Image: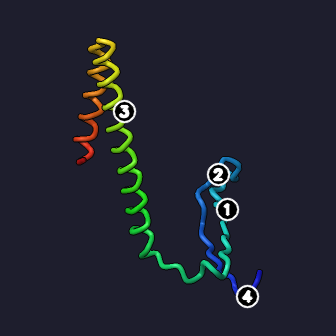
Amino acid sequence: MPSNASTIVTNGAPCRGASRGGERPQIQLTLPSCCRNLQAVNAPDKLRSKALRLEYTLIAYNILEGIIAIAAGWRAGSIALVGFGFDSAIEVFSAGG
């Protein structure tokens, strides 16, 4: 193992191939030196920003879907398609948008 790498050793969960004695395999992860200085504090912020990007994308998709469905339903005279469009609007409001 290179001297500039960090090593994490942990006990793993029992796997299907484990013996009946309850032995748990040890898992050893070696991190490259570039990842050694990462702080766990930044993980929640990164996850939060990723979740917000996903939520904004979902809201934009639902708005577009609702507009298209209502317009197509109105033009075709389909109450079901118009209802589907209004359902998309309800999803947007429930998401907080």
Q: Residue at x 39, y 69 (%)?
A: 45
For badge 1, the amino acid type reads Pro
**Residue in the picture at 30% in, 16% down:** 80
Of labels 2 and 3, the one closer to you = 3
Q: Which residue is mark 4?
A: 3
Between disc 2 and disc 4, the foreground one is 4
Q: Type of residue at label 3?
A: Glu
In the displayed structure, would residue 51 be above or below residue 6? above
Three-letter amino acid code at disc 2?
Cys
Q: Regarding mark 3 in the picture, which secondary structure is present there?
A: helix
- Look at label 4 and name its amino acid: Ser
The reply to whether dot 2 and dot 3 touch (C-beta < 8 Å) is no
Residue neighbourhood size for the residue with mark 3, other residues' Cα within 10 Å, grouped as few (<14), some (14–19), many (≥20): some
Given contact means CB atoms under 8 Å apart, are the residues at marks 1 and 2 in contact? yes
Label at residue 65:
3
Residue placed under numbered mark 1 in the picture: 25
Q: Position of residue 64 (x, y in %)?
A: 36, 37
